[in-house]
Amino acid sequence: MATAAGMGIGAACLVAPQVRPGRRLRLQRVRRRCVAELSRDGGSAQRPLAPAPLVKQPVMPTFLVPTSTPPAPAQSPSPAPTPPPLPDSGVGEIEPDLEGLTEDSIDKTIFVASEQESEIMDVKEQAQAKVTRSVVFVTGEASPYAKSGGLGDVCGSLPIALALRGHRVMVVMPRYMNGALNKNFANAFYTEKHIKIPCFGGEHEVTFFHEYRDSVDWVFVDHPSYHRPGNLYGDNFGAFGDNQFRYTLLCYAACEAPLILELGGYIYGQKCMFVVNDWHASLVPVLLAAKYRPYGVYRDARSVLVIHNLAHQGVEPAGTYPDLGLPPEWYGALEWVFPEWARRHALDKGEAVNFLKGAVVTADRIVTVSQGYSWEVTTAEGGQGLNELLSSRKSVLNGIVNGIDINDWNPSTDKFLPYYYSVDDLSGKAKCKAELQKELGLPIRPDVPLIGFIGRLDYQKGIDLIKLAIPDLMRDNIQFVMLGSGDPGFEGWMRSTESGYRDKFRGWVGFSVPVSHRITAGCDILLMPSRFEPCGLNQLYAMQYGTVPVVHGTGGLRDTVENFNPFAEKGEQGTGWAFSPLTIEKMLWALRMAISTYREHKSSWEGLMKRGMSSDFTWDHAASQYEQIFEWAFMDQPYVM
Ligand SMILES: Nc1ncnc2c1ncn2[C@@H]1O[C@H](COP(=O)(O)OP(=O)(O)O[C@H]2O[C@H](CO)[C@@H](O)[C@H](O)[C@H]2O)[C@@H](O)[C@H]1O
Ligand SMILES: OC[C@H]1O[C@H](O[C@H]2[C@H](O)[C@@H](O)[C@@H](O[C@H]3[C@H](O)[C@@H](O)[C@@H](O)O[C@@H]3CO)O[C@@H]2CO)[C@H](O)[C@@H](O)[C@@H]1O
């Protein structure tokens, strides 16, 4: 049998992986490690999964004229490192994948492979798309560059999952330079491409930066409006007043990027799949229809709108419409009239423009981040005013549950944890709990159930219910830790509650990724009483870490948390508690069921933990569903020509 020593990189990847929670997870990790090794190798190995062979095309004439003399870049002046030209991968061919092989047979096949064959094997371990495409994500945030919540997680992971399946993937987002975030963009280089965007009464120059990482082209749009202090969308005084302008720039720039940026030597070209996320990116399908297709450009492109959260739609007074640089006849696409009850005074006609609506009526397909939410958005209760329009597009509306990035969120490798553990050896979890209690200054008591909450302090998350339930809950023998930032009222309440219950409650006000990992690992129970939840990621992370979720049964929470059933025919089932309706009584009931199971039924509790940890929430599954959406989009003519 071949040994890893003395072999090439591919062979080194064949070292037997440690015992892991599940087959998919294990294979994906081995695969990722191989990709990392191959990337370090440089040279032609830099793009291990070759995307489509692209014929170098002449840059299409567009209405945006690149300026002739590039200005000096603001930062990172080195030229962009150019990855090698893309090798011919036989686009569109159906690659054999590992479906049908058992875990054993995969392992055996891997171990008998010769050094040369093994490199091929490594590539084939990752399921491949049947048809590969050029995919352009447009987003307001993507981790690790910039994140305010779950949108950042998804746009930081899904593009990589798609790239690993063979697609050529670009992500276009702002190059935020808000102080501490600067270092996140340190490896992105100035591309020397810059364009002038005609909107908001002038021509606004933006430049493009680029980093090739994890098989994805990360493209950062640079403009002074992305440089001011604060968070991504606002500061202590609230949301920035010019957000509409900032994301109009992003959308125009994203439409130009595939036409003008030669990444790895080649442009993406016109036949691409735009994945536009939330309102920040919602002008993209409108621009395709209103400003490109009439001139013969992007007729072969398609767009899918991904709705992560209907609560944010990018609505501004109608008077700003001319600022957007769109033809007057396209006003109807964005037109929005507030119902009378939402108007401010008798003369207010409620006329507005709504970015998200623009994408709802022009995108080729629409995806919500869970199936449950795809139904909720068509109802008056969940549709946030867009329910009728979304209902009218039901035939192209689908739900795909988000995945989680198991490189970042894995209790057996998590760099933020003091101890590691896995479904096969849970001992490290108890140690993580003790360390967390110590870090938070809570009494170190293994017997006391530790309940956690992590999230934006927003009406959506049901913090008001927690607030009302705390006096009652604090009578129990429990500990409670909350991590969050947002609504200043809730932040103040967290601080004062902490001083009221010193040995039981901690309120960590702020945004800290390391602390969020340690809470996820160290707690026994994660509480998510969200009023609505399009998908929710924290319950997925919790299950992966053996932390039992107690959630309001809504949207993606209902889709992903299976209610505990001790009396199921084939033995105990379920991964947590999904309570409904959303009342304090029901929430307390579910929490107390969890607490008593934790205390009095240790083996049932371990079963709950292990079933959660064995669930498969890897991105690969969701990525294959997105591919199906892409195929459907390309089967039809563009929805708006
Ligand atoms: N103070 C803090 N410190 C550190 N980390 C923090 C934090 N507050 C939140 N986070 C992190 O932000 C993310 C939150 O993701 P969620 O999906 O739960 O909600 P969010 O409402 O932001 O996302 C929206 O988009 C996502 C993605 O589609 C949907 O899952 C979701 O339902 C929808 O509301 C998690 O990674 C969490 O750990
Ligand atoms: O990833 C977390 C969420 O991030 C996005 O939501 C942000 C939203 O898109 C921004 O516009 C802004 O929302 C402000 C809103 O526009 C304003 O009217 C006011 O209500 O204050 C809001 C907060 O500043 O910030 C949101 C993040 O807090 C994304 O669209 C969501 O899907 C994600 O859930």
Image: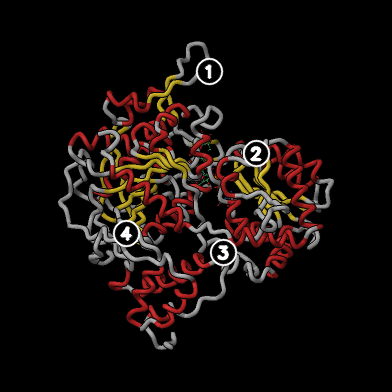
Q: Residue at x 33, y 61 (%)?
A: 166
Q: Dot 4 corresponds to which residue? A: 77
Q: Report the side of 219 relative to 589 (left or right).
A: left
Q: Which mark is residue 344?
A: 1
**Could you give the CA–CA distance between mark 2 and mark 4, rounded to whole angstroms?**
46 Å
Between residue 247 and residue 381, name the one nearer to us: 381
The answer to which of marks 2 and 4 sits earlier in the sequence is: 4
Residue 564: x percent and y percent? Answer: 69, 51
Badge 1: residue crowd in 10 Å (few <14, some 14–19, many ≥20): few
In this view, the mark in front (2 or 1)? 2
Which image quadrant is residue 52 in? Answer: bottom left
Between residue 510 and residue 274, name the one nearer to us: 274
Q: Dot 3 corresponds to which residue? A: 410
Q: Amino acid at mark 1?
A: Arg
Q: Amino acid at mark 4?
A: Pro
Q: Above or below — where is 433 with respect to 151?
A: below
Q: Report the side of 235 relative to 91 (left or right).
A: right
Label 2 lies in ligand 1 vicinity (Cβ under 8 Å): no
Residue 224 in view in this figure: yes
